[in-house]
Image (cartoon, grey):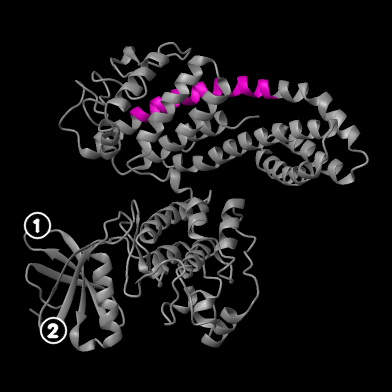
Amino acid sequence: MAGPGWGPPRLDGFILTERLGSGTYATVYKAYAKDTREVVAIKCVAKKSLNKASVENLLTEIEILKGIQHPHIVQLKDFQWDSDNIYLIMEFCAGGDLSRFIHTRRILPEKVARVFMQQLASALQFLHQQNISHLDLKPQNILLSSLEKPHLKLADFGFAQHMSPWDEKHVLRGSPLYMAPEMVCQWQYDARVDLWSVGVILYEALFGQPPFASRSFSELEEKIRSNRVIELPLRPPLSRDCRDLLQRLLERDPSRRISFQDFFAHPWVDLEHMPSGESLAQATALVVQAVKKDQEGDAAAALSLYCKALDFFVPALHCECLEPLVAAVAVAGGEGASAIAAADGFQKQLPIQNFVGDKAEGKSWTGAFGDSRGFGVGRGPLAPHSSHKPSLSADEVDAQRKEAIKAKVGQYVSRAEELKAIVSSSNRALLRQGASARDLLREMARDKPRLLAALEVASAAMAKEEEAGGEQDALALYQHGLEELLLLLAAEPPGRRRELLHTEVQNLMARAEYLKEQVKMRESRWEAETLDKEGLLESVRSSCTLQ
């Protein structure tokens, strides 16, 4: 039942308190459920304020939200109505919206922006799979679960539509600062407008204001209708992958804009390694393979697998709670349990001190995550057996589990460090062995300036790789040289020079792929920063980057 117009309305079962915000046709209040004391947000829509368009928006929002369950989309818990209002009872987000979060900090560090972008991309991927487009993406419509451990929650689906990527619309929707140019200039658009809005949000997070920030609407309209390429400021400095993503998102021509699939797969977004309930299971499976390759004496493959495993261990440590993570391993079935048991057997043969456990401290941890006596895949979520005290809080238990995983990760890092030395030595030997063939190829290319120049680029990549911290530049040189060499190889007639060129291209491709893996792994290590700023982070970076 509605109350007087000067205060919050009254709704059976709830106590409405402070006003959180208001929009065109709705006001949002913080509220408490009388029976459970659960805190919720209630969007109150006055029926008398509704016109045909706002009714359509409201019904769309209810229809979409009632069928969605995703960790980064605001949950619609219930909706009710009375003679005066319609009430949407929603999940409460205590951290406010992303706009306020950005502006109180002026700009966000790239590492923080990347975490938020992963979460937003995860929500958009889910919506994309349902053929839903939001159509009004902006920082004000992205909420934060809290300020202590903020998680993004996409909200306000009033403009959302069920659209496949190529369905076109002809109705102007959204906010001009975040609206794709084709919505204004062409009055027809498809789902790709959401990708432009993502680019504007990321730009604002990194540089403090959207790219079309203007003093007047006429200035804003001029910027939207312009054909000028969006230029990225030089400060603050950003990684290459971040700049690449921004430029591809902020492409005015939708046909040249990054696709949804390429966005979700982009190395800066890196959804594959986003913290999730699968992170620990994926890390464990990779460690099983790494241990096996290590036992077989395949140092290069083992190092690669250890580094890939660490890419999943670090996100696992960032999860709010390890319960669902380890449960995922526990319910994996007989195959998962037997694989871990096999890993235990392999690990006992590895030259790693304390790899099976630390009996001096009275622990009986074994293998990748132990047996039923210790970290119990059979017993459940990483619970120390007899030493566990029921009086510990959930946070304390969670912290203990994370410390246990960090200790095991430290052992894998130590082994990766040993393997790195072996593989680096082997790679240098292979490069020396191929030097004579490389010199012969260069001699045979004297009448082919283009081929000779491409070979020089490859040589520069090898030299750059030997420099401390030169991996990223070396990889760029490898990629540039290989693009040219592959074209030349396709046009090269049969003969000795073609054979030498083919061998050299294969060697360079293998080296570039391996280096790419190492660079990617090193750059993803920032996720460990909040866990151990100097210790684990630097160890992982060092161990998985070949010198």
For numbered disc 2, what is the local secondary structure? loop
In the displayed structure image, the side of residue 493 where residue 414 appears, left or right: left
- Comparing labels 1 and 2, the label whose residue is closer to the camera: 2
Q: Quadrant of residue 313?
A: top left
Identify residue type, mark 2: Asp
Residue 285 shows up from this direction? yes
- Are the residues at dot 1 and dot 2 in contact (C-beta closer than 8 Å)? no
Above/below status of 308 relative to 273: above
Which residue is disc 1 drawn over? 36
Identify residue type, mark 1: Thr
Which residue is disc 2 drawn over? 84
Q: Is residue 302 magenta?
A: no
As drawn, which residue projects farthest toward the right? 447
Horizontal and vertical percent position of residue 152: 36, 58
Q: Is residue 425 magenta?
A: yes
> Considering the image in quadrants, where does the N terminus appear?
bottom left
Above/below status of 502 relative to 257: above
Question: Does the magenta stretch mainly form a helix, a strand or a loop?
Answer: helix
Horizontal and vertical percent position of residue 366: 33, 18
